[in-house]
């Protein structure tokens, strides 16, 4: 049995930065450090930070400490959440991914110009909720081609679009075509909203699909980009494509009579999970492990100015 591992995989620059911010806040200020929502969508990461004194909350009302320090997750929040934090005298550190911040800025820009902004994404995803909060009266969320085709805009001459960062070019292509047919003058973002890491990981899984009989994607069920990787594998001919959180989820029946096993992981999954899955597969008889050729990623994001320590 042969194992092939995709490249790139795992942590992206935004996730690395968000976790580093929490770790450095713990070092600098000590616990408790509050984090609104999971800092990234991965149970292993969240549990590790809990053990170090991080308290995760879904609403700021859950924070009873006066002048507590709260970190906003990589997925971003709406301006209303910042206002609430200010009202409660909470000390905020914003760990939102800079690529998400870019989309927030675009929404504000188009809203100031009087445009209706179509946000392509999953309406219940925390990133989309935060982004739409920048201009709730002007943002319309579209999840599918069908929604795009039925969409009615008061002024079809003044329409712009942005996208959820964890989708891919393939995910948005058909929706964009439908929108451009409905609204020929629709404005595009100044630069592609799609996260480079999302696209790179999906491209790697496409290559992995050419060689694999079964593919395991390591990631959380709540992770949008991890779920998309499973969909990409299936769309490219690998019917046996599974999302697993770790080695404990492996069942020999899942890869019975599959001589080549492909592995990859979502952008919020630590590399140790991949190593554990490989080791578990070896106990089932995997004797050869190789990594596909793929893109090297060198992107790094600076720390927020609000931190009193440097990014060293």
Image (tube, rainbow, N blue to C red):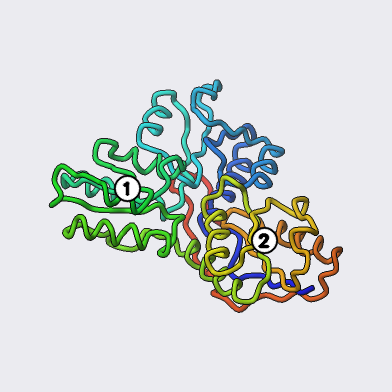
**Which residue in the structure is indicated by mark 1?**
147
Is any part of residue 118 visible from this angle? yes
Q: Residue at x 43, y 46 (%)?
A: 122
- Quadrant containing the N terminus is bottom right
Q: Residue at x 27, y 61 (%)?
A: 190
Across and down, in percent, residue 296 comes to: 55, 73
- Quadrant containing the C terminus is bottom right
Dot 1, crowdedness within 10 Å: few (<14), some or many (≥20)? some
Dot 2, crowdedness within 10 Å: few (<14), some or many (≥20)? many
Q: Is residue 216 above or below residue 144?
A: below
Q: Secondary structure at mark 1?
A: helix
Across and down, in percent, residue 174 comes to: 35, 61
Cα–Cα gap, marks 2 and 1: 31 Å
Looking at the image, residue 86 sits to the left or right of residue 42; the answer is left
How many discs mark residues in the rendered view?
2
Q: Which mark identifies residue 216?
A: 2
Across and down, in percent, residue 76 comes to: 44, 43
Q: Is residue 4 above or below residue 176?
A: below
Looking at the image, residue 196 sits to the left or right of residue 23; the answer is left
């Amino acid at each position: 049995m042969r194992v092939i591992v995709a490249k790139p995989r795992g942590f992206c620059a935004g996730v690395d930065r968000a976790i580093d911010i929490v770790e450095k806040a713990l070092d600098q200020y000590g616990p408790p450090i509050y984090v609104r929502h999971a800092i990234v969508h991965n149970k292993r990461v969240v549990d590790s930070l809990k053990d170090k004194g991080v308290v995760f909350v879904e609403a700021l009302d859950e924070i009873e400490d006066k002048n507590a320090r709260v970190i906003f997750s990589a997925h971003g929040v709406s301006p209303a959440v910042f206002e609430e934090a200010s009202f409660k005298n909470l000390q905020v550190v914003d760990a939102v991914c800079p690529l998400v911040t870019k989309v927030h800025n675009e929404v504000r820009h188009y809203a100031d110009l009087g445009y209706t902004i179509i946000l392509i994404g999953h309406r219940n995803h925390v990133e989309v909720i935060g982004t739409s909060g920048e201009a709730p009266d002007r943002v319309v969320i579209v999840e599918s081609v069908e929604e795009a085709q039925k969409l009615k805009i008061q002024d079809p001459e003044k329409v712009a679009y942005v996208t959820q960062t964890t989708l891919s070019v393939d995910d948005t292509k058909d929706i964009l075509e439908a929108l451009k047919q409905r609204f020929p003058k629709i404005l595009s973002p100044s630069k592609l909203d799609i996260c480079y890491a999302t696209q790179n990981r999906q491209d790697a899984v496409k290559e992995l699909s050419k060689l694999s009989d079964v593919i395991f994607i390591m990631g959380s069920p709540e992770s949008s980009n991890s779920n998309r990787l499973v969909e990409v594998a299936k769309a490219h001919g690998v019917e046996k494509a599974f999302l697993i959180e770790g080695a404990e989820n492996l069942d020999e029946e899942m890869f019975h009579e599959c001589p080549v096993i492909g592995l990859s992981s979502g952008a919020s999954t630590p590399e140790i999970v991949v190593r554990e899955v490989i080791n578990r597969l070896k106990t089932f008889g995997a004797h050869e492990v190789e990594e596909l050729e793929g893109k090297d990623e060198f992107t790094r994001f600076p720390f927020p100015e609000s931190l009193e320590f440097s990014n060293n």
